[in-house]
């Protein structure tokens, strides 16, 4: 059963209402411990995403373009565990911003998009919905849209992007990418990101079942 009560937030001097569930306590204030945990899990998430999107998958053009799907599936477990270990309002937004920053080397658009997706993901799990596995999976589908960050260059400055690809991977590689990325490729990227988020979230929930039960997360 949910028990509602009030706490005093000394640093603001106001009363703040929050919900306590069977296991997960939703608090508005992020503690130092929460920020350290967020940084640690965020680092793991970012390292894996960077390795996948810039070192492993680019070897084959079609795999590179499938990054939102493949990364989404692989990183789902990290995200779900992160959500369990740092069950605070704002923690998901922080992760989104970190991914946005690391994928905004060529243009600032990935950061702007990541901020928007971070806000949407936080709204999805707002309040007691943080105790719902379905809500967490849905929020991950949105967060996984940040994996599209490296591809904003294709949408905004394709010629420059292909020129860089030619330098690093050769003309044939760049020509293949060009043929595989028509103007409507953004629709494919979004679909792959949402599907990767769904599969990754479901997989993460499955392998972390004991953690979900312990935290009181319902299906």
Image (spheres, rainbow, N blue to C red):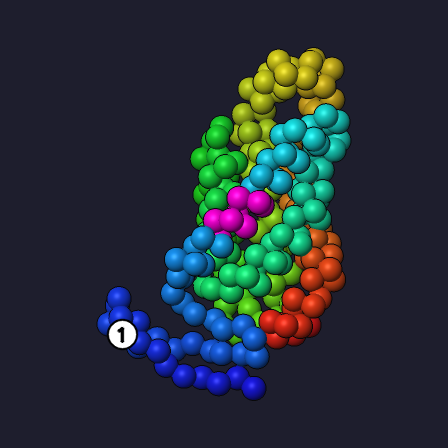
The residue wearing badge 1 is 14
Q: Position of residue 103 (x, y in %)?
A: 52, 36
Dividing the picture into quadrants, the one containing residue 50 is: top right
The reply to whether residue 109 is in sight is no
Residue 64 spot, x, y in % from top left = 70, 32
In depth, the one of 146 and 212 nearer the eye is 212
Number of disc labels: 1
Q: Is residue 90 above or below residue 55?
A: below
Q: In this view of the protein, can residue 209 be seen by the observer?
A: yes
User: Looking at the picture, does residue 218 appear above or below residue 167?
Assistant: below
Q: Main secondary structure of the magenta part?
A: helix
* Residue 194 shown left or right of residue 155 in the figure: right
Q: Counting other residues with Cα less than 10 Å from the Cα at mark 1, is it few (<14), some (14-19), or many (20 or more)?
A: few
Looking at the rendered image, the quarter that the C terminus falls into is bottom right
The stretch of residues the image draws in magenta is: 38-45
Q: Residue at x 55, y 29 (%)?
A: 153
Instruction: Specify the quadrant of the image occupied by residue 129.
Output: bottom right
Residue at 45 percent of width and 63 percent of height: 89
> How far across and how far down the image is residue 207, in percent?
73, 60
41 magenta-colored: yes
Q: From the image, which quarter does the N terminus lie in?
A: bottom right
Q: Going 65% across and 48% down the picture, which residue do you hit?
A: 75
Q: Is residue 127 above or below residue 176?
A: below
Front residue of this view, candidates 169 and 48: 48
Q: Is residue 172 magenta?
A: no
| Residue in the picture at 50% in, 68% down | 126
Secondary structure at badge 1 equals strand
Give percent across and percent down for residue 63. Answer: 74, 33
């Amino acid at each position: 059963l949910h028990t509602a009560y009030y706490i005093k937030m000394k640093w603001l001097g106001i009363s703040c209402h929050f919900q306590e569930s069977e296991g997960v306590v939703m608090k508005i204030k992020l503690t130092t411990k929460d920020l350290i945990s967020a940084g640690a899990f965020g680092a793991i998430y970012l390292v894996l995403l960077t390795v996948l999107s810039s070192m492993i998958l680019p070897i084959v053009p079609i795999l590179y373009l499938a990054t939102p799907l493949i990364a989404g599936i692989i990183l789902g477990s990290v995200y779900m565990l992160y959500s369990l270990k740092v069950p605070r309002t704002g923690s998901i937004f922080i992760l989104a911003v970190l991914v946005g920053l690391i994928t905004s080397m060529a243009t600032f658009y990935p950061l702007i998009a990541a901020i928007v997706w971070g806000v949407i993901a936080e709204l999805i799990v707002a309040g007691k919905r943080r105790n719902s596995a379905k809500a967490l999976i849905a929020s991950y589908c949105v967060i996984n849209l940040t994996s599209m960050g490296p591809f904003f260059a294709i949408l905004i400055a394709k010629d420059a992007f292909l020129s860089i690809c030619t330098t690093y991977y050769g003309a044939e590689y760049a020509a293949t990418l060009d043929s595989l990325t028509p103007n409507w490729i953004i629709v494919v990227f979004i679909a792959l990101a949402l599907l990767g988020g769904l599969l990754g979230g479901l997989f993460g929930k499955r392998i972390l079942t004991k953690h979900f039960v312990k935290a009181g997360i319902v299906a």
